[in-house]
Structures are given as structure tokens and as C-alpha cells.
Amino acid sequence: MELYEYKAYELSDMLKSGEISSVELTQSVFDRIEKTDPTIGAYLTLNRESALFDAEKIDLKRASGDELSPLAGIPIGIKDNISTAGIRTTCASRMLENYTPVFDATVITKLKNAGAIITGKLNMDEFAMGSSTETSYFQPTKNPFDTSCVPGGSSGGSAAAVASMEAVMALGSDTGGSIRQPSSLCGVVGLKPTYGSVSRYGLVAFASSLDQIGPIARSVKDAAMLQDVICGHDSMDATSARRDYAPISGKLNGDVRGLRIGIPKEYFGDGIKPEVKDAVMKSVKALERMGATVKEASLPSTEYALSAYYIIACAEASSNLARFDGVKYGYRCENPENLMDMYERTRSEGFGREVKRRIILGTFVLSSGYYDAYYKKAKLLQKRIRPEFDAAFNDVDVIITPTSPFEAFKFGDKMDDPLAMYSADICTVTVNIAGLPAVSIPCGYSETGLPYGMQIIGRSFDERTILNTAYAHELDFGGFRSPVVSCGEVEL
Ligand code: GLN
């Protein structure tokens, strides 16, 4: 077995015991990237030299007997909307093609303090707007299970890199499903943490009230390990929650006896592929056999959630993206005639179609005369969704749904039909609107070997219960299935 194939928790032990060095591991991951990334296209920027340099420093520290974090020496990829000092951060947009931040996002500072090795920056939908990574200005990213299919989005580069073993783990961001949906389509574990538990300082804002950074990994234990490092209060983020964050990794035992699982019928309706529903319910039955109890739950506002999400997200995006005006940083058009011409052409040329669509939609729903009809209604709905979850959590400990209504789809399938693309988020957006934590975990495979994902939603700040439920499922269902085994046709 090659080093890049191991899980983070295994590598952590191997590094600690001195069986392997971080330089060997980092080298192995970069060899893998060199071999497979021309096919997959997960990376936009590689950080090879610094990574090997940092790995050597960690090896020396370990040799001198320093007490190190479990993440020390582990190579991790970063979605390209998270600021990395000295490493280009593009948001997969022409607007930021040549932008190199001078500061690290708080999550990056935390990773560096833990001794993690940054492999590079991962492809995504432009400014995290999309569900297939096809809106990236630079390149498509292929699904490692079938390269004619999308990896999902917007953290498609992160999920594909982890699935193709071009990174041991990765960070993604999730505004309406962008960690969970690509994780589902690429057969990996993706955690969207509770809003406020991971600092957003240094995350390029899409919709600030919904955005959250989180881990993507090949095992539940790995995701827990990464979450333990990145969570915590940060005074640089005004929405960061001040509380105790008890470590989760090391506490997972897969014991679900007495756990109450809620199944909301609204998430098992017509739009969801029958095979996906079957795979999820089969996994729920298995959890029941392990001692959990299953009951029906009701979340009646679900049918309006997607509309509310696209109104709120676009409204916030239209405001957040106003800063890209050709003045402060980023792209500026050639030879502007005057200030207005500069603004207009900079933004017309710098942003792609989907981003422009959302800015226009967001500006529309916030404009006088339409504000009450759209934005205000969406916000009222948001006020209803959270109490509905709270009521459901009076009777159950976790809520289980499909993550995505369908498995990975072909390139181009949904690009000309925004509504079809938006429907990919039907099961995930409510969780962001309510600010809750949720994890997606593989729960089945289609006839052609494409993964299905199951979403486990929990109470605010109860990442531990959803991860423990996911861990129980993982023990029963089996861990990460590598694309080489299940697909076979792609020589990776
Ligand atoms: N796919 C959703 C969208 O396009 C979610 C994006 C995200 O979570 N960043 O808005």
C-alpha cells in the first residue's frame, strides 16, 4: 500500500511511532498528484516546495521530542476561497486570477499551528456558486469514480482530491451544500459544522449568514480530527460562537443504542431518485439493528426552503461581491475610459455567467418594491425553518435524509438549466438556513459504481452525535471505497 492511500488517523500513528516521516508522506502525495491530477484536475495551485520544507521542519521537531498535534505532518488540500498568505487564492474566478493574499484565514493559522502540511489550492465553482464545479473559470474537475461525470460542487476540487487520494484530507466551504453534496458524489465524508463553530475570517464571503468552512475526509475519524483542530471561538469573526469545544476524535465508539433517528418524509419525495432513497433507508435499517430507534419526523417548510435559500444567498452575494470593483484588488479591465466604464467592464469581464446571474437576482430581490415580496418573505421563512428543526429535535437525536437527490451527473447535463442545477441542493440548504451541523457519508453505489450519500443532521453544536452515528454506519457499511476498485476503467 502506498502512503497516500492511508487515512489521516492511521498516518498520524505511523508518524508518531517514527515508522514514516512527513517528508516521505508529503512526497508520496505529490507523486500521486503528478500522476492523477492531469486526469482529475482538482488543483489550481500546488504548494510543493513549501510543503516539503514544512514537512522537514515537522520531522525535525518530532525528532527533538516535541509533543505534536495529531495533524502534524499530514498533507491537507485547501479550497481556493480560503485565504492563504503567499499562495494564490482565486475563488476559481478571473476576478482573482492573480490575487495572492497577505494573510492567512484563521483555519489556515490553526492548521499551521497544528503542523499540518498545505498541499495546494483546490478547484471550485466560481465564488462557490454552483453544484458541479463547472462554473470554475479555469478548468473542469472530473469525478474520480467516472471521469465523464462532475464531482459535484462547489467544493468539487476538495472532494475529488480526497477521493482520488491527491490529499489525505481537505477543507471545503458550505453555504447551501457545497461540502456535503460533492462529498456525496465523490464517495467521501463531508462535515458542514454548526454555523459559528469554525471561524469564517479569511473565507471569501459568498452569503455570510450561511457560509461555513468544514472538513472533507476518507473516514469519519479523520473528519473529526480535522474538525477538532479548526473549530473554536475567534475574535476576528463577529459571528463566531464563544463556548467550549470538547474534542470529538477519540470519543467516537459507534455505539448507537438508544439513539433516536428521525426520518422526515419531506426529504423522500418525488424529486429524489428511488435508488438513493433505498440506499439511505437500508442504512437506517442497519442502524436500527444496532440499537437505534427510528421514527417519522416532520419539517413542513422544506418545500419552500430552496426558494428561500436562493433569495437569501443571492441577496447577500450581491452585497459581498460589490467589493470587486477593479479598485482595491483583483482584475481591472484594460484602458477604461472613465470610472463608470472601469466598473462596468471590470465586473462584466471579471465575473462569469453564474456569478453575474446571482448578483443581478440578489440586487433585484433587495430593490425597493421587490424587497417585501421576495427578500422579506424568504427571511420570514428562515424564521420558521429553525423552530421546525428544534421541534423535531425534541423527539429525536439526529435526522437522516439523502444528501443529493441523484448520483454524479454528466458534464453539461445541467449547465443550461439553472433550476435543474439548483435542485441538486434540495436536501442540503435547510441545514444552512437553520445553522445546524450535518455530515454526508457514503451509503451505497449505483449499478455503474457511482456513490450515493446519506445526510445526518444534528442539534446545534452537537457534531459529536452526528459523527458517532456516521461512524456506526461506517463500521457496518465499510469504509472508503477507492475509485480504482469500484470503477476500474480509469487507470489512476
Ligand atoms: N450549490 C449551492 C449554490 O450554488 C450551494 C453553494 C455552496 O454551498 N457554496 O448556491
Image (tube, helix red, strand yellow):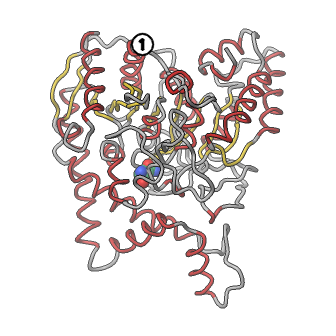
Q: Quadrant of residue 191?
A: top left
Q: Is residue 331 left or right of residue 402?
A: right
Secondary structure type for disc 1: helix
Percent x, y of residue 333? 67, 78
Residue at x 61%, y 53% (from the top left corner): 139
Q: Is residue 210 visible?
A: no
Q: Quadrant of residue 406?
A: top left
Is residue 35 shown above or below 211? above
Q: Is residue 61 left or right of residue 246?
A: right
**Mark 1: few, some, or many residues within 10 Å (few <14, many ≥20)?**
few
Percent x, y of residue 176? 39, 48
Percent x, y of residue 377? 23, 63
Judging depth in this view, the residue of 397 and 19 nearest the camera is: 19
Quadrant occupied by the N terminus: top right
Three-letter code, disc 1: Leu
Percent x, y of residue 78? 62, 41
Residue at x 67%, y 70% (from the top left corner): 331
Residue at x 46%, y 40% (from the top left corner): 182
Quadrant occupied by the C terminus: top right
Is residue 319 shown above or below 231? below
Judging depth in this view, the residue of 305 and 157 nearest the camera is: 157
Q: Is residue 272 left or right of residue 198?
A: left
Q: Quadrant of residue 177?
A: top left
Judging depth in this view, the residue of 71 and 127 nearest the camera is: 127
| Most distant residue in the bottom direction | 337
Label 1 belongs to which residue? 475
